[in-house]
Image (tube, rainbow, N blue to C red):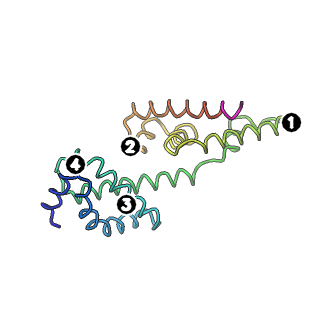
Amino acid sequence: MNEQEMKIAFAETAQGNTNAFSPIARQLRPAITRFVLSIVKDEEAAKDLVQDAFIRAIEKAASFRGDSSVKTWIFTIARNFAYAHLRRRKLQERSVSTLELAMGAGWGSYSDPEKIASLKEETLILHDALAALDPETREIILLRDIESYSGKETADIMELSLAAMKTRLHRSRLKLLAELKRRLK
């Protein structure tokens, strides 16, 4: 399938004919999978990310302006997914335990065994509440509130505008608060 045929098939995809994308996916899948695998170094994750990239390409086909080739556009989507995956994996590796966060916030300054037991219970509740949140919600809280990245840094990492990041952060904090209240009942 040459570039012209690919653009025609992609235009049909943009008009709602998702079957028109199949030949594009068949042609590009091996190369994109190798490319993503070279970034993430995890075969299963690479396969999932390529599939996610193809789904995003189909969803956003109508926004393709033709400034680049279809192949380049889809490779860029896959690249963005791969690097977002790496950022999430790094966040998980770097995340500080909830107990360490609580201690840093002064919760560990108690010498009374009853207060220490209460602290551990609260820490477990916080940890469980964070774990119950969806990955995007947890990610923004980890970046801003735990890792203390600036608003701009967080927005850049998440590929959001600063305003969108602030809105998402506010909503994420509300979700965490609601989850904590639910667990404390």
- Please provide percent x and percent y for residue 3: 15, 62
Amino acid under label 3? Answer: Val
Quick one: SS at disc 1? Answer: helix
Magenta highlight on residue 93: no
Task: Evaluate if marks 2 and 3 touch, with contact meaning CB atoms under 8 Å apart.
Answer: no
- Please provide percent x and percent y for residue 171: 50, 31
Magenta region, mostly helix, strand or loop?
helix
Which of the two labelled residues, at mark 4 and mark 2, occupies the earlier sequence position?
4
Residue matched to label 4: 14
Q: Which residues are drawn in magenta?
A: 181-185
Which of the two labelled residues, at mark 4 and mark 1, occupies the earlier sequence position?
4
Nearer mark to the viewer, of 2 and 3: 3
Q: Is residue 83 above or below residue 120?
A: below
Q: 175 left or right of 106? A: left
Nearer mark to the viewer, of 3 and 1: 3
Residue matched to label 2: 159
Amino acid under label 2? Answer: Glu
Magenta highlight on residue 183: yes
Which of the two labelled residues, at mark 2 and mark 3, occupies the earlier sequence position?
3
- Please provide percent x and percent y for residue 6: 18, 60
